[in-house]
Image: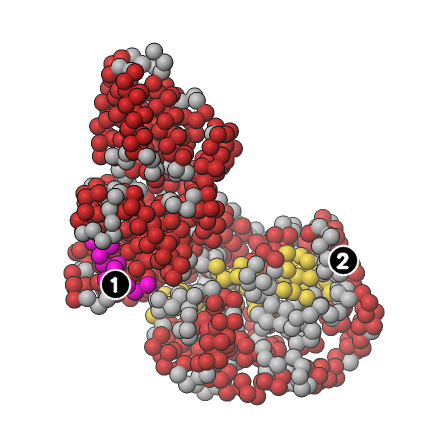
Amino acid sequence: MRSAAPRLLVLAGALAVATGSRAADARPDRAAAQAAAQRLADNWGPVDEAYSAAFATIAERRWGDGEAAFAKALELVTAAGRDATHRAGLLAGRATVRLNLGRFADARADNDAALTALTGPRDRVNALFEHVAIARALGDFRLATDTLRGLDRSAPAAWPDAAKATTRRLALEEARNRRAWGDLAGAVEKFEEARVLDDQSADGLRELAACHLLAGAPALALPVAQRALEQDLHLRGVSRRRPRDQWVEAGDASLLASLRIAADCALAARDHAAALAHYETAAALAAKLALAGEAKLSALGRARVLVAALDARAAEITPAFLDATAADLERSVPEARLRLEILALAGELALAGGHPAAAVKFLSAAAALVEQARATATVEERRTFLAVQADSYRRLATAATRAGDAWTALLAAESLKGRLLQETIQPGHDRADASVAQRLAQLREFQRRLPADVAAISYANADWARTPPVAIAITRDGIKAVELAPGRLKFALELLPAAEILKAQKRDVDASRYDLGDEVTLAGLIAYYRECLTCKGEEIAARQEPQLAIMRLLHDFLLEPLRPALGGRKRLLISPSGLLAYLPFETLADRERRLLVGDHAITLTPSLFTTLALAARPAATFARPMLALGGAVYNPATYERDMRGAEQMKLQFGQMLVAARKAAFAPGRSPYAGVFGGPMNNLAGTQAEVQMLGELLPGTRVVLGREVNEKNVRALAAAGELRSSRVVHFAVHGAALPSRPALSCIALSYEGHFTSDLPAERDGLLQLAEIQQLPLRAELVTLSACETGLGAILAGEGVVGLTGAFLSAGGDRVLASLWPVNDAGTTYFMQRFYKLHLVDGQPGDLAMAAVKREFITGQAGGFRAPQFWAPFNLYGGADLLGPAAAN
């Protein structure tokens, strides 16, 4: 007798591949499937009949019957002494059944056992597809991704006669993996690719809807989710007009998933009646199918609707209800993704219901699961996964603040900043498997190392409208978390030009990233304030009144609540959140109009953990005080003429400043020389700047003109010059591209980079990836250029741009700018900063503050306005910390 196992496996596999999904997503012709199974049974004996009956449960999606059918077949195979291939085929089939019953650990055991014995390429490919789904269900996204990468090569060869279906199946699994890691844009792309091949899959439709919903696009998600639900009902022979108890009677795990995503989308669209009906139907169906995790999620979804609709039944949502719902998850809900969703929803409801301590418990557990999943991830997957799960950390920061748990609030706030940057600065410092206790111990060590005159401030939730911003002040004497009252901010916004602020919010790339619609938020206010600070000369007078109002408003909102906790300390290390990273804090003014820079010195850091990682670097010795590069060639045709003024600028610097200021404020001109669009111009001030630095600091190596090119920078690096100079100073053009941060760069001498015929290493643009690979070691990297402190603001990472690239390459601190800078004013700024810092020996933050005060008091040729001195910031903060504890 021919072996039944291969033919039956081919039959089940063909059904799965023909529908382009795992067996759980199959839509076979049931009559044809039953007929095929019957023909096989007619020709074979009792063992083969049991085979046929078992695999028919997969073809007909009868998961409840499948467990018993496969158990019977396995028993008969064992008794008949069949070879290992027969048993492996049945184990692979039972793994499919158990996967769809939510018994993921058992499914993995069966599938692993099957893979050790299956030899046929098609059988192995089918089992490996199930392996991907099981690994993802158990939260092992790394295994799912790696297994699918192997299937990209083996699956098309195994099914050459079903190329279209195989391609669709691969696209669907790739989309699911990308969604699991938080790469929503990539997931949508792959789901759309699968839809081109088959537009009728309810599974693909509902997962596409979920991606749109997670990306903050409910208007796109809702019609897709409705179509998925209609498709699932149609496949089960049930009309949407039938009573919902018939939906439950005919339903299975696929319909349950469609009900839940339809409910989530309806809730996001504020259709509370539809959402409530879908969640309640989903709960009944989950109970019928004995899927504990889905039942809990449906119950929590119903609770969210009651809260959102201000329904009287929301009173039922007590801590006891939430505790009962989230109880015993390890045993009752084996799927890590469902456990995470349950805990996050329970925390959200506890916070909304005024139970912060309960919210901290649930959200801390959810965050622990996120960190556990990140432990298996690649670098990019860690970032996207943390970004899509960031809401749990944001709510945790607020809940812990309300519960009086400042350390947990601080840990939540800092867990969404600079995570990948920490890893590149000090591999192993941000270990994904580090426990909460270990990360808290690091923050306590940070507090211990703060000097008596330094305070740190960590902000959270400044980029999110749904949870109030939080600020945590840390000194060596204590820690205090406060919730910043948004009501005060909204009241003040009524006195400001709201329409203009909204326009600025919509124009700003990073403000628009948060899908704020027509709601003016803190992000929009910062965007408008930055426009006030960088406006053209003739606009300054008209913008002065709102600018002054925002200076006082933001001081009152961001700093005044922390005054008691700061204890009069004047040196501040600030870890910002969201668009606060682009705010020049030193420009903020108290109610007496005293600027913060008047008696404070500010250093920014990507995160407090980043500062600790920088401080952990071994001390370095340097052969020269500075490597200074400037006067690059941007327009060869006019370079010689443009540079003639450099020597005169050095000799008559004071008079030049006054003349430059008058020219900057001439009608119709921007105060910033040639940086508002158009081709890059030659900058005489950069040549004068680095030449003057060479005179100020004997031993400085000065690189000028055409030598300021990528080839020479690489040659300097190879010669060790980037590791032997205490300061590396670039006086060049710079560009930050928030929409494509990897292209952010500093521009070196022209080598044809306006054409596409040169490789990246010779295009004249030193971009992020190239910077990160430089063998650099310096106390300070100065980017005397435009907008070098900007980048893309990404959830879970913060600003991704030039500052982080130079910190990761080996700079302990970076001096960078927040907007386009004036050539002459920048030259003065750098001269005075280095004189105070490197010659006179003042700490960097104090020297920076002193130079800014010189601008304010008119010592810089009249460049008094914040436009000229406020863009410059120091990033890092390791120099502010005391020594580490002795081991």
Tell me which segment is drawn in magenta.
Answer: 269-280
Query: At 37% from the left edge and 21% from the top edge, which residue is drawn?
Result: 7
Q: Which mark is residue 713?
A: none
Q: Which residue is mark 1?
A: 272
Q: Secondary structure at mark 2?
A: loop
What's under tag 1, amino acid-wise? His
Query: At 40% from the left edge and 53% from the top edge, which residue is drawn?
Result: 211
Residue 395 drawn above or below residue 865: above
Q: Does the stretch in magenta take in 782? A: no
State whether residue 843 appears in this view. no
Q: Quadrant of residue 819?
A: bottom right
Q: x, y percentage for residue 601?
A: 52, 73
Q: x, y percentage for residue 737?
A: 58, 62
Q: Which residue is mark 2?
A: 751
Query: At 54% from the left edge and 85% from the top edge, which residue is drawn?
Result: 543
Residue 78 drawn above or below residue 633: above
Q: Residues within 10 Å of mark 1 (few under 14, many from 20)?
A: some
State whether residue 786 appears in this view. yes
Horizontal side of 743 relative to 83 (left or right) equals: right
Q: Main secondary structure of the magenta part?
A: helix
Horizontal side of 865 relative to 646 (left or right) equals: left
Q: Secondary structure at mark 1?
A: helix
